[in-house]
Amino acid sequence: SPGGTITLSSVDGLGVGQESLRVDAGSKNLNLTGKIGELIPPGSLDFSGSSIQLTASLVAAFGSQTYSGPVSINSSLTKIYSAGNMTFESSVEPGLASSSVFFYPGGGSLEVMGSLGDAPLNAIRIYGAGRISLQDVSANSLGIAGGLAEVFLEGEIQLQSPSVLFIDA
């Protein structure tokens, strides 16, 4: 049926990187409330829905991560770890005024195809990415560090006052 929400609490794999997790909520909202991969990270993650609410403070996988649908960061700090590519096929926005997101792509790429902080995120940090592609970024601070091969920042980059920008390859 149209509308509604699918809620997923904490999830761990049985063996490190052995299983993959795919949740397709279709026209429903997807709410990830617990930590994903905190003890035993699954292989890859694939989430889709009309909206994806990340209330979880930790999402980790040994493979790639794909988010098909607009993502809302509903935690003061959400850390997203991967040993593969991270792809957000829509926007990543704050659900709280104090929402921060830290990305750890483990040498893989980070691509956000929609805006990253249409309303400003508190802090955005990206560590250890092999390639970064962002567009229309809005935050109080933006930090990029470690192992960078390519960085593409397109559209408007808005840092709110007081603001911090650091890029340390």
Image (cartoon, rainbow, N blue to C red):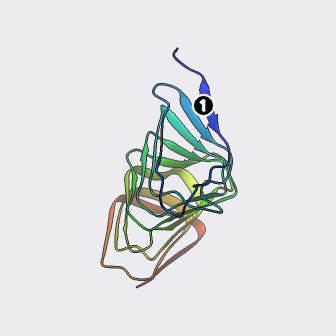
Q: Which residue in the rendered view is the most extreme toward the top?
A: 1
Image: 169 above or below 161: below
Residue at point 66%, 51% (across, down) = 56
Report the front residue among 15 and 149: 15
Residue at point 47%, 41% (across, down) = 70
Counting the numbered discs, the total is 1
Location of residue 135 in the rendering, given as x and y in whole percent from the top left corner = 37, 56
- Left or right? Give the position of 110 relative to 38: left
Q: Which residue in the rendered view is the most extreme toward the bottom?
A: 169
Residue 111 appears in which quarter of the rendering?
bottom left
Dot 1 amino acid type: Ile
Check disc 1 and report its element: helix, strand or loop: strand
Residue 163 appears in which quarter of the rendering?
bottom right
Report the front residue among 164 and 162: 164
Which image quarter is the C terminus in?
A: bottom left
Residue at point 64%, 61% (across, down) = 38
Image: 101 above or below 163: above
Location of residue 6 in the rendering, given as x and y in whole percent from the top left corner = 60, 31
Location of residue 35 in the rendering, given as x and y in whole percent from the top left corner = 66, 54
- Left or right? Give the position of 6 relative to 147: right
Label 1 Cα neighbours within 10 Å, binned few <14 / some 14-19 / many ≥20: some
Image: 80 above or below 92: below
Image: 89 above or below 153: above
Report the front residue among 37 and 100: 37
Residue at point 47%, 25% (across, down) = 27
Q: Which residue, given by chain and number where applicable, does mark 1 sit on?
A: 6
Report the front residue among 84 and 113: 84
Location of residue 80 in the rendering, given as x and y in whole percent from the top left corner = 55, 61
Residue 141 appears in which quarter of the rendering?
bottom right
